[in-house]
Amino acid sequence: MSLATRRRAAAARMNATALEASVKPAASVDNPNVSLARRRRARALGEQHAKDAAKAPAAEAPQPGNPGASEYELQKARLGVDLRRLSEIQSVERKIALKHDLLPAYREWVDGVLAADSGPDDVILAYCMIWAIDVGDYGAALPMIEYVLRHDLPLPERFDRTAPTLIVEEIAEAALRLMGTAKLDKIDADKLAPFETAPPILGYIVDLAGTHDMPDPVKAKAHKALGLMTQRSGLLLDADADGPAGTKRALYEVALAHFRRAFELDEKIGVKKRIEQLDKEVAHLAAEQGGE
């Protein structure tokens, strides 16, 4: 490497460090001190940057005079500060709490990128999607998930999974942590409320697992999670709900189908006993309904 090249590289590192050092931890956009004009500007610049980046060659550097590109560099510097703050925390619970606090500061930028819908790689949006999944805000995560999938965007380099795999696995595991070993009909409905998105997030990830390549055990987790949620819905119904066919029995049959598919994909997924129990319950309900 020539002396001139080394000097340019050192200067670039110094500029990045200086930029990052100038960024203070973001105030929440819910804070009344953050002006409406500032939020509108962030959204507009996010949209502008996404449109400009989509038109520019992939290897082309951002233009210094472009407000959208300049704002993107500031957002990335802020993200670097926030990622370091997260890396200094060992507690998963505290990391999730911090992500929850950090997300609002990026909301307008992300909204602008989503509005442009032009598809350039955007590390801000990628991290916000992952953080929204981590904190269980699936309603906020869904538009970002759909954007990332629609434009086939990669995750940041530190992640070794594809975007579809991470999305399916993280959401399925969150559901399994809540329902995997609990009495399904005793789980507080408020704890399951984050999964009640439109479209329902567990059905969404099962469909996603069916249309994208990912490890079979990951797909199995999605089917098990949806099976548990469906079984819970059946448990909360009366046996004779909705006429002769019985919605309760129908829900159990749907849950069984997901458990069986999960077992096909991964025999260690832990659904064998549930399949046996639900088989008996379905047969019992069918006998009761047949005798009416």
Image (tube, helix red, strand yellow):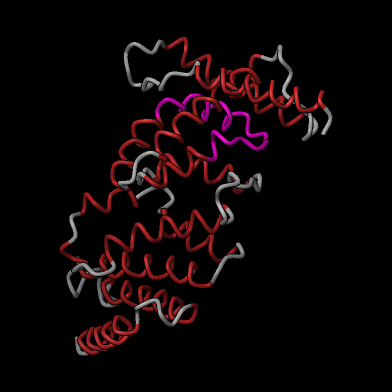
Residue at 46% x, 60% y is 169
On screen, residue 219 versus residue 113, left or right, reads: left
Q: Nearer the viewer, residue 204 or 167?
A: 167
Residue at 28% x, 49% y is 193
Residue 152: percent from left, percent from top: 65, 48
Residue at 41% x, 77% y is 257
On screen, residue 10 versus residue 98, left or right, reads: right
Magenta region, residue range: 104-126
Q: Tell me the chief SS of the magenta region.
A: helix
The quadrant the N terminus occupies is top right
Residue 230: percent from left, percent from top: 32, 67
The quadrant the C terminus occupies is bottom left
Q: Nearer the viewer, residue 187 or 161?
A: 161
Is residue 120 found inside the magenta-colored segment of the image?
yes
Q: Residue furthest right?
A: 2
Residue 197: percent from left, percent from top: 38, 48
